[in-house]
């Protein structure tokens, strides 16, 4: 499965457009991570616990987007974007969306 932020893929033609696909996950903060993150915030530097949590959320959203595209018969998703929104205090949604397409074989 090709997943790209571009609207076209060089050397490939779109045979069929299936439409919008998306993958989402909602994550909340964890008290253990928050304590460590607060300590790191005082001393400065990267807050590794949150970096890891967000990376996992992005991967989960991409996996769900890909599964939805495959179920439609797509072999690529173009125009992929990410968006986040606060759901409640301490919890956020990470949404990944794009257009599912079937690409013609390479020329």
Image (cartoon, helix red, strand yellow):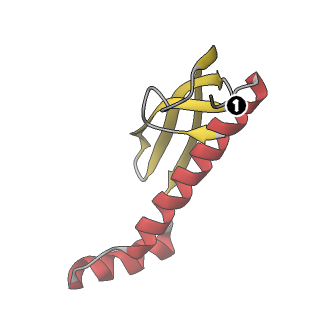
In percent of the image, x 61 and y 24: which residue is there? 100
Residue 11 spot, x, y in % from top left: 52, 30
Whether 73 is drawn above or below 46: the answer is above
Whether residue 18 sits left or right of residue 87 in the image: it is right
In percent of the image, x 48 and y 70: which residue is there? 31
Whether 21 is drawn above or below 19: the answer is below
Q: Which residue is mark 1?
A: 68
At mark 1, the secondary structure is: helix
Q: Nearer the viewer, residue 27 or 78?
A: 78
Whether residue 30 sits left or right of residue 44 in the image: it is right
Residue 63 spot, x, y in % from top left: 65, 45
Residue 72 in which image quadrant: top right
Q: Nearer the viewer, residue 96 or 5?
A: 5
Q: Nearer the viewer, residue 60 or 37?
A: 60
Q: Does residue 56 appear in the picture of this structure? A: yes
Q: Nearer the viewer, residue 3 or 63?
A: 3
State which quarter of the image contains the N terminus. top right
Residue 43 in which image quadrant: bottom left
- Mark 1, Cα crowd under 10 Å, few <14 / some 14-19 / many 20+, is some
Residue that protrudes farthest toward the front in the picture: 107
State which quarter of the image contains the C terminus. top right
Q: Does residue 19 appear in the picture of this structure? A: no
Residue 79 spot, x, y in % from top left: 45, 29
In percent of the image, x 64 and y 31: which residue is there? 106
């Amino acid at each position: 499965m090709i997943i790209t932020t571009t609207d076209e893929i060089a050397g490939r033609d779109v045979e069929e457009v299936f439409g919008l696909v998306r993958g989402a996950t909602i994550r909340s903060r964890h008290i253990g991570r928050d304590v460590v993150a607060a300590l790191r915030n005082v001393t400065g530097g990267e807050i590794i616990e949150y970096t890891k949590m967000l990376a996992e959320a992005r991967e989960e959203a991409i996996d769900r987007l890909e599964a939805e595209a495959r179920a439609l018969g797509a072999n690529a998703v173009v125009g992929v974007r990410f968006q986040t929104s606060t759901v409640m205090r301490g919890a956020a949604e990470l949404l990944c969306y794009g257009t599912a397409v079937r690409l013609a074989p390479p020329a």
